[in-house]
Amino acid sequence: MKELPTTVRRSIELLGLCALGAVIAIGSEVIMPLLMAGFMSLLLLPVFRWLRRHRLPEIVAIIICIALLFLVVAGVAIFLSMQVAGFLGDIDTIQKNLTLHWNSLSEWISQKTHLTLKQQMSLIQKQGSTLGENITGYFTNAFSSLTNIFVFLGLLPIYIFLILYYRNLLLRFIYLWFEEAQHPTVEEAVRETEVIVKYYLMGLLIQITYLTVLLGGILLLFGIQHAILIGITFAILNLIPYVGALVGNVIGVLLTLTTSQDIWQIWIVLGTIAFVQFLDNNILMPRIVGSKVKVNALVSIVGIVLGGALSGVMGMILSIPVMAVLKIVFDKSSNLKQWGLLLGDHRPELSPVANRMYRIKHDLEQRHDAKVDEKLDEASEEQGGE
């Protein structure tokens, strides 16, 4: 069979990516719960296999896995609600501090712009009336978002149960897509996907824990009120790469302003967050996850923005593991290796313009992390014993 011209193949690839984006945008309410359930199922597989090795019935093992997952989620939710309740219990202090900060801000504005307090209040009232005109729309959107969250949480355990129950059927469907000669490559891609997703999600759970303890503990030492609330809020928002950390800084400052009259505490909060984030990015998280999720920073940021545009916050959270899985698929495909190279974090040492060796496609080599190979062997042994 005659091979298609390069331009035609590249056009088909780009059209395929555009079609994939369109499908995600149109069907995000269906696709996002399925994706999250798929990733959660991979995370629960080791527990499921352990239970099966101890002679538990398959359905009972799946139910126990789902129950353990939701116990963890419920524990985090209860802990967070207790911190929020403690914060709201200081409502009198919050109102007093907000009034003090507002007076200071108003005085500063008067000095810089020569606007009187009456003029400032007039501007605020105008903005308030504009906001009031749209308040119905805001409440409608908020109610719609809340409804979507409850639907998502309701579908998630059902999807996880069915994915684990029909896991062999889904795997057979994947294998039947390919010729028998390609099955070893497919098997390698499946095992590598399991390892990388498991590493990434477990890393996020560990990251939430140590960020809460580190940030909250250091702020407590400095006497910052509601330090644990600031810590857990930042840790959860940090699940959204890059963007979440920025929002977490802003919320940390706002929480400090509402509970303190001292401006120096704001600098303590910002400095502590910066210090903990430095430890997280350069020491802790690399040692926990290592180089398993090999997606470069440029593609990560673009993917997060696209994920947010296509599927909202959930798209931003899932963008990194989705790109990691896509990179595995691209690396295993002989025709799509250039896309895997684009997603990866390996930088050519020399310019391809002046060095021919960096232009040749067949010189792209699959680079495996030693620990990934080790974990792949372990996963193979676990599956063999199931």
Image (cartoon, rainbow, N blue to C red):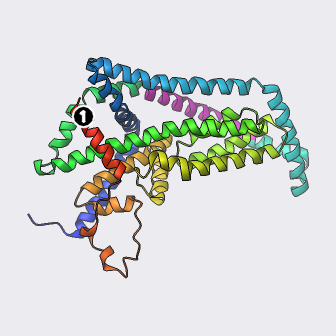
Q: Is residue 57 above or below residue 18?
A: above
Residue found 39% across the figure and 70% down from its top? 348
Work out whether residue 133 can be spotted.
no
- 261 and 109: which one is in front? 261
* View extreme (left): residue: 1
Range drawn in magenta: 128-153
Q: Is residue 294 above or below residue 260?
A: below
Give the residue at mark 1: 383
Membership of 35 in magenta stretch: no
How far across and down, in percent of the image, does residue 344 sit? 39, 59
- 341 and 363: which one is in front? 363
| Chief SS of the magenta region | helix
- 244 and 275: which one is in front? 275
Membership of 130 in magenta stretch: yes
How far across and down, in percent of the image, does residue 179 sit? 12, 49
Residue found 71% across the figure and 24% down from its top? 86
How far across and down, in percent of the image, does residue 103 sit? 88, 42
